[in-house]
Amino acid sequence: MPHVYPTLRYRDAQAAIRFLKEAFGLTEHMVVPGEGGTVRHAQLAWREGLIFLRTTTGQGLDAELGPICLALVVDDPDAHHAHASAHGAEILEPPADAVHGRGYSARDPEGNVWYFGTYAPEV
């Protein structure tokens, strides 16, 4: 089991879940509905990891929204990029080779930046 769970807050968490599943290929593990169509807590899976997200309340720490940047390992960054582009992801950097492997970056509809690449450090 992972020991780190990145947690994102979205103004429209339902739309974010749809986008992250369709464009980036995350899978829905759990969604706990909140009041008025909000998302109280959601878990999206990526390989053996989970990303948490929810609808922001706009109060306290929730008043401060991203953007944040997440890096996810993919086997084929070019194919992932083509899929994400076809599903409306805003591409910030197209696939390219770097010292740490090959990858690309994209922005989700609420401004968070996602990097998808082959880099997988040993822990």
Image (cartoon, grey):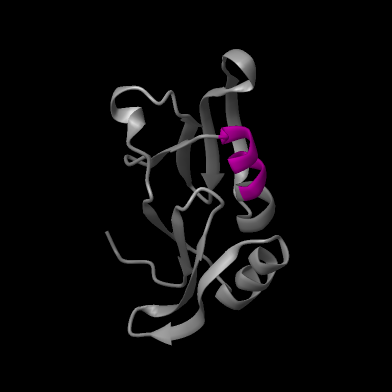
Kindly identify the residue that appears in the image at 66 percent across and 68 percent down: 85
- Tell me: 3 left or right of 30: left
- Furthest toward the right, the residue is 86
Work out whether residue 31 or residue 55 is closer to the camera in this orientation and state it.
Answer: 55
Q: Quadrant of the N terminus?
A: top left
Rendered location of residue 80, percent (x, y) = 62, 68
Work out whether residue 79 or residue 58 is closer to the camera in this orientation and state it.
Answer: 58
Rendered location of residue 108, percent (x, y) = 54, 54
- Tell me: 25 left or right of 72: right
Q: Which residues are magenta?
A: 12-19
Kindly identify the residue that appears in the image at 58 percent across and 65 percent down: 90
Rendered location of residue 29, percent (x, y) = 59, 34
- Tell me: 119 left or right of 33: left
Kindly identify the residue that appears in the image at 71 percent across and 60 percent down: 87
Work out whether residue 63 or residue 112 is closer to the camera in this orientation and state it.
Answer: 63
- Furthest toward the top, the residue is 35
Q: Quadrant of the C terminus?
A: bottom left
Kindly identify the residue that appears in the image at 32 percent across and 39 percent down: 3
Q: Main secondary structure of the magenta part?
A: helix
Image quadrant of residue 12?
Answer: top right
In the rendered structure, does residue 120 fall within the stretch colored magenta? no
For the image, the number of numbered tags is 0
Work out whether residue 62 or residue 120 is closer to the camera in this orientation and state it.
Answer: 62
